[in-house]
Image: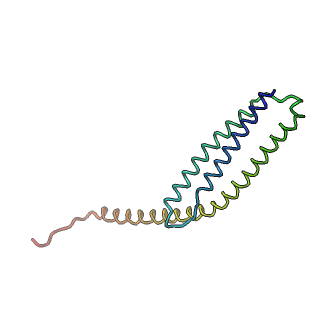
Amino acid sequence: MENLKEKCMDLMAQKIDLLNRIVALTRAEKFTGNEDNVEAEVGAFIDLFEKRTAIIARIEKIDDALGLLDPFDETDLFDNQFQDNIVNFREQARAIATEMIALDRANAAAVEKLSMHLKQNMKNIRQTREINHRYLDDFETTGGSFLDKKN
């Protein structure tokens, strides 16, 4: 059973490392919601989202592997060090999750500003296209032609 415990501890350590990587990536990005940096911030947000998604997929694989481990026997329930390690990993994961939630909430306000700015720009583009389209349609449907009256 020691090999099973070691594998469990190894998988949990990998999971904690990946969770810490998500936090580090999120901390590294500072979203201001400033309209002057809209394109750069939107690009950075998309990159962050893609990186986090890839890491979360790896975490899900680790969770699946943990679920596939054979059930522990009764002696493992009384192994205090093993139980302490599991509790420690869970506490670390909870602390990381709490920090991620705080970071995401702080970034959500900036992302909302960026979203509103992009929506306004899209509305302006749509209105401009409609105006241009109407102008071109009216010009093309007149059925008339221009005559040169100098002759």
Q: Quadrant of residue 16?
A: top right
Q: Is residue 128 above or below residue 84?
A: below
Q: Is residue 21 left or right of residue 117?
A: right
Image spot of residue 46 (x, y percent): 55, 52
Q: Is residue 71 above or below residue 18?
A: above
Q: Is residue 27 above or below residue 9?
A: below
Give the colour scheme of this rendering.
Answer: rainbow
- Residue pushed farthest left? 151
Q: Is residue 2 left or right of residue 145?
A: right
Q: Is residue 18 above or below residue 106?
A: above
The quarter in which the C terminus is drawn is bottom left
Image spot of residue 43 (x, y percent): 51, 55
Q: Is residue 141 left or right of residue 24?
A: left
User: Residue drawn at (22%, 65%), measured in percent from left and top?
Assistant: 145
Image spot of residue 52 (x, y percent): 61, 47
User: Residue drawn at (65%, 51%), measured in percent from left and top?
Assistant: 23
Q: Quadrant of residue 73?
A: top right
- Residue pushed farthest bottom? 150
User: Residue drawn at (44%, 63%), measured in percent from left and top?
Assistant: 125
